Amino acid sequence: MTTTDNEYREQRLANMRKLEEMGFKPFGSAFKRSGRLTEIKAAFEETKPVTAAGRVMTIRDMGKSIFADLADGSGRMQIYVHQKQLGDQLFNAFKCLDLGDHVGVEGTLFITRMGEQTIKVDKWTPLGKALLPLPEKWHGLKDVEARYRQRYLDLLSNPESRAIFDKRIQTIREIRSFLQNRGFSEVETPMMQAIAGGAAANPFKTHYAALATDMFLRIAPELYLKRLLVGGFDKVFELNRNFRNEGLDRTHNPEFTMLEIYEAYSDLRGMKEMVQALILHVAQTVFGTLKLGEGEGAIDLTPPWREITYRDLIIQHMGADWYSLPPAEASAKANALGLQTEPTWSLFLITHEVYEKVIERTLQQPTFVTRLPAQLVPLAKVCDDDPSVVDVFELEIGGKEIAPAYSELNDSLEQRKRFEAQAAEKKEKVDEDFLTALDYGMPPAGGMGMGIDRLLMILTRSEAIRDVILFPQLRGKTVSGQ
């Protein structure tokens, strides 16, 4: 806390003591409202009695009368306080309020000479004292680091930030509605697991004292959702948190929101129709447009969306002879693009590095990248015409992977081979319970994951994932001078 903050706090503590001396409790109790401020304004009738509550955002003291603005979670509304109407005690106590204080008011509605809907206050009560000032009205909270660390101040002072999170709330609501209208059931699966499976990622490890065993925060819900397919749930989705103990950057947060969808008797093509319809629905319903942004960086969601194979993309960018190059030559070409490859890497590893670090960011318009190498996706079916590739797509928008989807592998014998090959010598990493579930018979299915945070980055045209997560993970703050 700065010296200035301490001074403001002392001033506000002095005002709080004045209120207490007048017989008021600065930190009040529950207060019954006629409605939120936007609801009161929507049902406005002159002389109508109302009760309202909110945070004092402005105060305009005119001597024997005061105009102030209240704000709650829905919006703002003006109130009018007059000494004659309130009496000396309530009026003088009102003058002890500071910006940011929460109050409850009772009064009647009227329209001022300036035409503004206003509450004429007959009675008021303190509800919550603010001991520190809010960010300055006209400039808001501009320090980027402070906006993330003190999101509550960011939301109070930056309307554009509040708008992003209102859109996030609406987006998640519409996703649920869309899937439920298609007959999908929302389910919950364990977030603490004995084996971290369903994706290739480094997990967070914890210890379950009651069972004296190590556990992992989940990196994906996939294997549990497929167990539900075995159990007879034929259309399921989960919208919840995943955790990956990896880097912090513009597009990665270690705790993130993921949507996973599984539909029995469907496949990759069913998921393709699903994800396109879902994103179009959200864009039109929540954002009112399929055109996102302006200029060269604009994204157009209007169908049809491009579809191209992984191999064709590589050839387009790296040349027709790429797949015939020796690894050393391929490595040299990749390094010339600014990549850092290792001498021991195979052509497969070099190719995927090129795809992830060079090609992916060029895919600005919606693109389904299909037929990925089988080594990348051990939970997907291989393509009938070529067992070296799998029946999957990665949906890329704005240079980011938004949604991978598969024709799911339901052959328990083949799944065991792939798990054991992936685990190598660490057989304890093979999820035997999941393989047993598959032995009981899983229907053919389409499955898809969608990164909600990345989708919102696209839809809101945000530059960093931290802009669309209310409380993103941040590096430790160095504190000096204390």
Image (cartoon, rainbow, N blue to C red):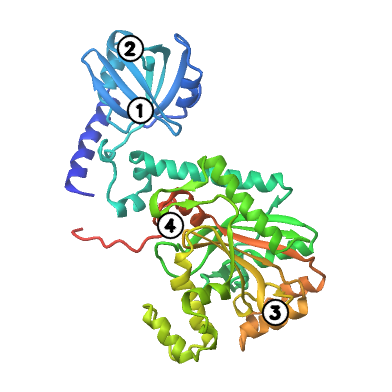
Is any atom of residue 24 visible in this view?
Answer: no
**Mark 3 lies on residue:** 386
391 in relation to 106, above or below = below
| Disc 2: CA contacts within 10 A as few (<14), some (14-19) or many (>=20) | some
How far across and down, in percent of the image, does residue 9 sit?
Answer: 23, 39
- The residue closer to the viewer here, 293 or 303, is 303
Indicate the secondary structure of the residue bearing disc 2: helix
**Quadrant position of residue 263:** bottom right
N-terminal of the pair, mark 3 or mark 2, is 2
N-terminal-most mark, 1 or 2: 1
Name the residue carrying label 1. Answer: 25
Q: Earlier in the sequence, mark 3 or mark 1?
A: 1
Comparing marks 3 and 1, which lies closer to the viewer? 3
Q: Position of residue 306 (x, y in %)?
A: 57, 60
Characterize the local packing of mark 1: few (<14), some (14-19) or many (20 or more) Cα atoms within 10 angstroms: some
Q: Residues within 10 Å of mark 3 (few under 14, many from 20)?
A: few
- For badge 3, the amino acid type reads Asp
The C terminus - image quarter? bottom left
